[in-house]
Amino acid sequence: MINSRKTSVTSEQIKSLLSYAVLAPSSHNTQPWRFEITDGAVSIFADRTRALPANDPDDRELTISCGCALMNLRVAAAHGGIGVTCDITPDSGNDDLLAVISFNKENSLSTDESGLFKSIEWRRTYRRRFASRDIPTEVLDSLSENASEEASWLEVIDSEDDRQKVAELVAEGDSIQWSNPSWRRELAAWMHPRRRGDGLTVPGIVAPIAQVIVRTFDIGKVVGAKDKQLADESPILAVLGTAGDNVADWLAAGQALEKILLSAHSQGLQASYLNQPIQVASLRPKLQNLLSQQGFPQILLRLGFPKDEIDAAPRRHLDEVME
Ligand SMILES: Cc1cc2nc3c(=O)[nH]c(=O)nc-3n(C[C@H](O)[C@H](O)[C@H](O)COP(=O)(O)O)c2cc1C
């Protein structure tokens, strides 16, 4: 338990905060982060040995994932009565150093931190069909506010016509990605049995067969049809975006994403991703053209009330991600 009466924060307390940071979502569950504790502060580094060059050639999603971990750290600190100061992309000559977080007594989060804190453990990427229940407007407004608080925007795809167009872009993205053998190989390489502690979980016994299928066959049409249906049926489809498209914007998008996911969970929702029209460079401007917000789409989310509970995805042990 974090002791809020102390003015300085010990390494043990920081480690306790980091145990929540690592529960953040990450693309392909690569957990592409490393942490270093020095003088009561913590540095977050991008671990580019865990990059996905075919899926994410600019490390954009990798950086967003690190931003999600940073938000968990901030929420856990706020829950423990510890304020944080974040120095984003400090000028260190090391491109891997994304942020240095120092701790102080003054709290910096404006939303209901304790509500968000409980959700760190229970947020899931929910890829199944959602219950056919509408999401109240106040909930959507609160999620948009979460995005604005983190220098990002969230635009809900409102009209049936636009939703249809987005669903078609998702299917087109699937088709382009699956037709690329490098992309399929990379996906297969991250399909792991649970005991590995990372990657997309496949039962140990079928993992080798599943990997061969993914590596060998272009099943883009089948996946595209399924994803199109998921997009069509989702109670809410929304795009998270930023004004710019550099490392600082991606870190902001990651913090916004995790704040939205935690806040959504605290209001009964879960989410999953249909990022294909953003991951495929030629489709990203087409998605942007459908939006009224200016800037760059970063994440395409579907949100809804889950029908059941699902297991947490595995994580590596904290020792594996600390310097
Ligand atoms: C930046 C980012 C991009 C992601 N892209 C996708 C995606 O395109 N498709 C998908 O199914 N999941 C996507 N995910 C979800 C991850 O696969 C998921 O976070 C990971 O498997 C861990 O599971 P959890 O979120 O339930 O903890 C993404 C997550 C992040 C943070």
Image (cartoon, rainbow, N blue to C red):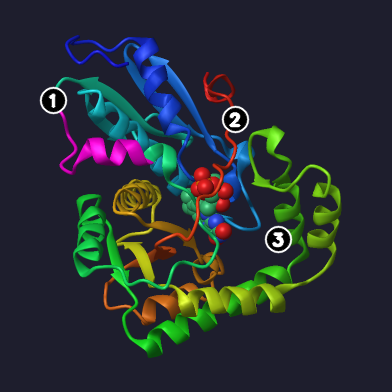
The amino acid sitting under disc 2 is Arg
Q: Say if 78 sits above or below 158 in the image.
A: above
Ligand 1 lies under 8 Å from the Cβ of mark 1: no
The answer to which quarter of the image holds residue 39 is top left
**Dot placed on the residue nearer the N-terminal end, 3 or 1:** 1
Mark 1 crowdedness (10 Å alpha carbons): few <14, some 14-19, many ≥20: few
Asked whether 109 falls inside the magenta stretch, the response is: yes
Q: Which residues are magenta?
A: 107-119
Q: Nearer the viewer, residue 30 or 100?
A: 30
Q: Mark 1: which secondary structure?
A: loop
Ligand 1 lies under 8 Å from the Cβ of mark 3: no
Residue under circle 3? 183
Residue at figure coordinates x 73%, y 41% from the top left: 193
Q: Which mark is residue 239?
A: none
Q: Say if 298 sits above or below 156 in the image.
A: above
Residue at figure coordinates x 28%, y 27% from the top left: 77
Could you tell whether 119 is left or right of 26 in the image? left
Residue under circle 2? 316
Q: Mark 3: which secondary structure?
A: helix
The amino acid sitting under disc 3 is Trp
Q: CA distance from mark 3 to mark 1?
A: 45 Å
Residue 117: x, y in percent? 31, 36
Mark 3 crowdedness (10 Å alpha carbons): few <14, some 14-19, many ≥20: many
Residue under circle 1? 106
**Dot placed on the residue nearer the N-terminal end, 3 or 2:** 3
